[in-house]
Image: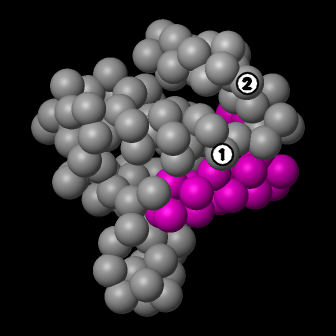
Amino acid sequence: MIALNYQNFPDALKCEIPGFSRIYDEHIRNYDRLLPHVLLANLVRFLSEELRLRGPQSTAIRSALTLLEQGMGSADPMLQELVAVSFLENLDSRLTLALQSDFGPNLKEQYQKYQSKR
């Protein structure tokens, strides 16, 4: 896989997360352009629905967490900020409880920083 950055991350989400391409395409239709922070908020809602329908072992959830972990570990500070602000800070408590144990080290560290500021 190529190194993720702020510019290519949305396309990676679309291509790598089963079922998310529909959400991505709807996002583009609604906004006539890509708004990465809004797209990540859509991802949170998508994952919440995946959790409800298929449980925490959903392939889409596993794929998303892998990409989000890679994004948080990216050398691109804009991508790190995107994941931190628009994914981690938008998680609801039910989704957090279900996913937190599967966070990789980068997501865990950032989530702990976020929690310590609350």
Q: Which residue lies furthest to the left in this view?
A: 2
Residue occupied by mark 1? 90
Q: Which of marks 1 and 2 is nearer the N terminus?
A: 1
Front residue of 53 and 68: 68
Q: What x and y, as percent, mark residue 113?
A: 57, 16
Marks 1/2: CA–CA distance: 13 Å
Left or right of 56? Residue 88 is left
Q: What residue is drawn where x is 66% and y is 20%?
A: 117
Measured along the vertical axis of the image, is residue 76 above or below residue 118? below
- Badge 1 vs badge 2, beta-carbon distance below 8 Å: no
Q: What residue is drawn where x is 14% and y is 37%?
A: 2
Report helix, strand or loop for mark 2.
loop
| Residue 25 seen in render | yes
Measured along the vertical axis of the image, is residue 47 above or below residue 26? above
Q: Which numbered disc, 1 or 2, marks the residue closer to the eye?
A: 2
Residue occupied by mark 2? 118
Q: What residue is drawn where x is 35% and y is 33%?
A: 80
Give the magenta range. 38-58
- Label 1: how many residues lie within 10 Å, few (<14), some (14-19) or many (20+)? some
Front residue of 42 and 2: 42
Q: Quadrant of the C terminus?
A: top right
- Disc 2 marks a residue whose amino acid type is Arg
Q: What x and y, as percent, mark residue 93?
A: 83, 35
Residue 44 part of the magenta segment: yes
Q: In which quarter of the image is the N terminus?
A: top left
